[in-house]
Image (spheres, rainbow, N blue to C red):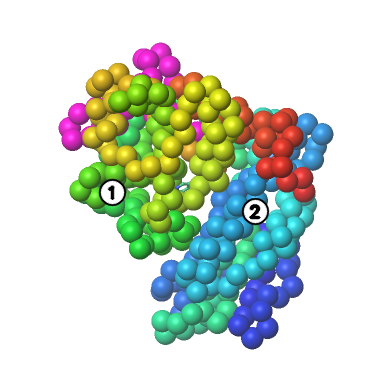
Amino acid sequence: MLTIEWNKTTGWQKPHIVPYQNLSLDPATCVFHYAFECFEGMKAYKDKAGQIRLFRPEKNMERFNKSAARIALPNFSSTALIDLIAQFAKLESRFIPQERGYSLYLRPTMIGTQKTLGVNPPGSALLFVIASPVGPYYPTGFKAVSLEATDYAVRAWPGGVGDKKLGANYAPCIVPQREAMSRGFQQNLWLFGEEQYVTEVGTMNFFVAMKNKQTGQKELITAPLDGTILEGVTRDSVLSLARERLAPEGWNVVERKYTMKELDEAASEGRLIEAFGAGTAAIVSPVRTISWKGKLVHCGLKDHEESGEIATKMKNWIEARQYGDDEHEWSYIC
Ligand SMILES: Cc1ncc(COP(=O)(O)O)c(C=O)c1O
């Protein structure tokens, strides 16, 4: 693991890469009481030449710094931390299988370590990075999921911290997720407000492809970054690739608020083409149905299909850049 300590008098200390080990913390340490914790999720890939690559690590660092700043934890130099993570990933190269779909999951984490029950900015912090090899999310090909729209609980709200990757955002999401699972759905879809705006799915951003009611034009839609949506690296990559490669084919790529009612209407009028989640773990996760107000909204997949065309293309395009098959500035060679 990579560890870097910080304290408010001398700043960031010398980084260390040490064997994976327990942390020893006083029970009064502020992380345990007031949730001074934020994290990132990213991966290191091995290309055909055996080089280790990160995918858009500056996006993770930017988000990590924003999350840390929001909970009074210190900021750091993005380029310095990318360099350290790159050294760490290279050192662990033997844990990164070369095959497509495999990677080393990296979990940069920052916690407040001051021993105090006083509710104050932490005077000391620990940044650490742990890692684990991960295999393909869909070892036997895509498997479309069924969602339950959650309207009795919200993940995030205006003026809140839903756009930050704070541990405190995740624990309260487990119960609604488990409730959806207990009713046979793989994930829950987070709605917001009386209008029932569609926001995110589980721990992924959410995209829908549908035909515009008025013009019939094909649109790829996702919720805008209004402070309630996590600024996903995959979301940004999907939008950017869609603008580059789908817009010339006549697609309109839109970041706007949209409601569950709109989705339902599009589905019943045969205008809903496909829907998918987007995140680092799976890249894309195709959605078959959404349970909402006691009915099942079908998201456009035929019974024998596990993924729509856009989701499949996005997975291939993003993967090609992650593994350096499509050499691109998004890929950072360690
Ligand atoms: C709530 C939430 N939304 C979206 C995402 C997707 O973000 P990314 O594409 O950076 O993995 C995540 C993933 O970590 C998440 O936890």
Q: Amino acid at mark 2?
A: Glu
Question: Residue 58 got which mark?
Answer: 2
Q: Residue at coordinates 52% horizontally, 69% vertically from top-left?
A: 69
What range of the chain is rendered magenta? 281-306
Residue 21 drawn at (x, y percent): 64, 62
As helix, strand or loop, the secondary structure at mark 2 comes to helix
Residue at the extreme left: 294
Judge: label 1 CB < 8 Å from ligand 1.
Answer: no
Q: Confirm whether residue 289 shows in the render.
A: yes
Picture quarter containing residue 10?
bottom right
Q: Residue furthest front?
A: 215
Residue 264 marker: none
Q: Which residue is mark 1?
A: 192
* Quadrant in the rendering for residue 200: top left
Which class describes the residues within 10 Å of circle 1: few (<14), some (14-19), or many (20+)? many
At 41% across and 46% down in the image, what residue appears?
224
> Dot 1 lies on which element?
strand
